[in-house]
Image: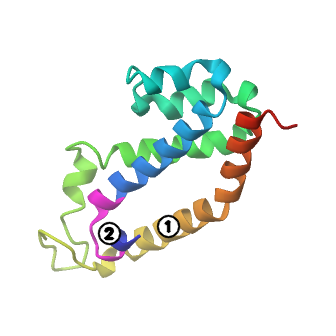
Amino acid sequence: MKLLLEGLFVPSGNSQRYVLESIATALLVSKPSLGILDRYVRNTYSTTKAIRDVVRHADTLRLNREALATLRQHSKLYDLCSHPTQFASASLMTLVPGNPQTVLGGHFDEGKTFAYEREISSRTSLASVFPNFIYAVGRNYLGLT
């Protein structure tokens, strides 16, 4: 959130992608019967595929497919922050009407207020469901019903 508030969209998005992949990885390894925990320990599992795999194993993990669709949608946006895409390049341009500029480093851009509001809403929404992720990991790992 600090990176976002400093106007560093690309590093902020990359960090958010890391968070989403970490959540997905935790969910996957919480069910040892999937074999992903063993692969993770042996360093043969690519966590960049965790979101894809958590969607594939949603039923086994007893996860809400609608919530996972949102997770996948957000991760695709943050993928744009992890590669030299047009989105990443455009984040360096201000959207101030009549005075566009290239900015290196953090900068609050009034022209991107809509994007700041959307990201802050998205991140606070994600934080509000963390207890659900923690519960699902514990339920799957401990075999609770």
Q: Is residue 64 left or right of residue 12?
A: right
Which picture quadrant has residue 66?
Answer: top right
Q: Which residue in the protein does label 2 denote?
A: 3
Residue 94 colored magenta?
Answer: no
Residue type, numbered disc 1: Arg
Q: Which residue in the protein does label 1 denote?
A: 118
**Which residue does the image show at 52% across and 35% down from the upper left?**
51
Residue 54, percent from left and from top: 59, 31
With respect to residue 27, does 18 lie above or below? below
Quadrant of the snapshot with the C terminus: top right
Q: Main secondary structure of the magenta part?
A: helix
Q: Secondary structure at mark 2?
A: helix
Residue 93, percent from left and from top: 19, 66
Residue in the foreground of this view, choosing between 33 and 115: 33
Q: Secondary structure at mark 1?
A: helix
Residue found at the very far right of the displayed protein? 145
| Residue range of the region highlighted in magenta in the rendering | 5-12
**Which residue does the image show at 58% across and 18% down from the upper left?**
35
Residue 105, percent from left and from top: 15, 70
